[in-house]
Amino acid sequence: MSWFLRMVLLILPAILLVYTYTGWRLTVALGQLTSWPRPRIRRSVRFVAGYLVIYPLLLLLASLLNATVLNEALRSGQFLAKLFFIFPFWIGLIIVVEIFPFLLALDLSRFLLRPLFKKYQSLWLKSQALVTISLFAIIAVYVPVRILHDTYSVRLSKREAKIPRLPAEVEGFRLVQLSDLQADPYTGEQKMLRYINLANAQNPDLIVFCGDLVTRGTDHIEHGAKMMGRLQARLGVYACLGDHDYWANPQAIAQQLKENHVTTLEDSVLTLAASPSKISLTTVTNVYNRRPSVQTLERLRQQRNDNAAVHLLLSHQPSDELIQFAQRQGYHLLLAGHTHGGQVVFKPFGIPLNVSQTETRYYSGFYQIGSLWLSVTNGLGLTFAPLRYQAPAEVTLIVLKRKS
């Protein structure tokens, strides 16, 4: 059984459970506030809920029956599949998951305040129904608008890394961090151009790319590499490889990037001249099927130019082991991507929740961990979902400053 099929089987029961509960709550609320017949309300809610979960059911069916054409249409995002199944599923799922904890809290409050509920039962039920309908209305408007904004916009995040004893000639050094271009049918050329142009507009001294040029296969390698070839920085553009690059064709990706003036580094150390100071760039390959060994990390430490003014560590995944290594060895900056900023981030009662948190708590942003600065950028592209929600694409600009 493929990894993809296992994931569908794993999440489908949870999806059906959440839909069942929210559908039931919506049915009850509509029944209390309208004069519509209850059977009609139930049928309508079930029809909408059933339609919204057709996509994972079709994926499951296509995999079980080995229906290649259907499977490819669903997974590659053909226009009709996106319009009628893929986007409705994801938008509906986000709406339902966003409203679920609020509905649960309303039911829990009724249980905890049972004496009050018994005294004012009629008023309570009507008020709860009104709140339920209002929540559905607000969230049903907010979610699509937010998805549209976050999926198609690119933001600039400006950071300052304060480094002790930073030489004057390196102060103000401008480092642009990119990641997860994910060239595929969903990441269109115009969005990639906005991403590249925004990076170039920062007048960077150095650009680093944290991996994942493509999402799957080899069809988009050349296009993605040509887009990367538009990048311009005084000291050059350097990249590591990500999980999807290794699953696609790492040799072809490295070669295409080289032909477009982007240097791909794997488990290596490079010293860059910053007139007259030096900047040390260590690249560690850290992906699912290739973790750095203790011997590799020790070799990289020995090869590092300890006289450099700034020590940078570039990797795809921000794993705890690599963070600890960077701290111990005195790196100033660890640059990573991989997480997409969570890509789809829920915030029930202000608490951020996303799938990337199952791997790391450092899923997006700029963190100071002791003397180490960790930058995890959202990148550009998409993986498990064809959209972004509360995690927009991001170009990260890091300016080096002397710590007083």
Image (cartoon, rainbow, N blue to C red):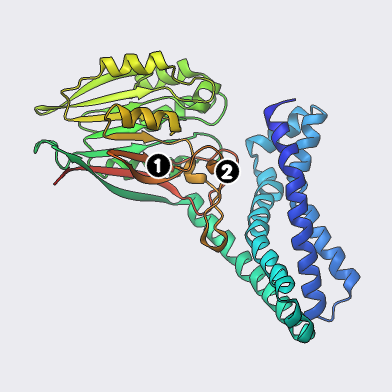
Q: Residues within 10 Å of mark 1 (few under 14, many from 20)?
A: many
- From this view, report whether residue 18 is shown above or below residue 238: below
Quadrant showing the N terminus: top right
Residue 394 image position (x, y, % from top left): 40, 46
Front in this rendered view, residue 269 or 115: 115
Tags 1 and 2 touching, CB below 8 Å: no
Q: Which residue is mark 1?
A: 377
Front in this rendered view, residue 223 or 270: 270
Residue 53 image position (x, y, % from top left): 75, 49
Front in this rendered view, residue 350 or 170: 350
Residue drawn where x is 29% and y is 19% of the image: 301
Q: Mark 1 or 2, which is nearer the eye? A: 2
Residue 299 image position (x, y, % from top left): 33, 13
Residue 306 image position (x, y, % from top left): 19, 22
In the picture, measured across the screen, residue 211 lies left or right of residue 277, that is right
Residue drawn where x is 63% and y is 35% of the image: 76
- From this view, report whether residue 320 is shown above or below residue 393: above
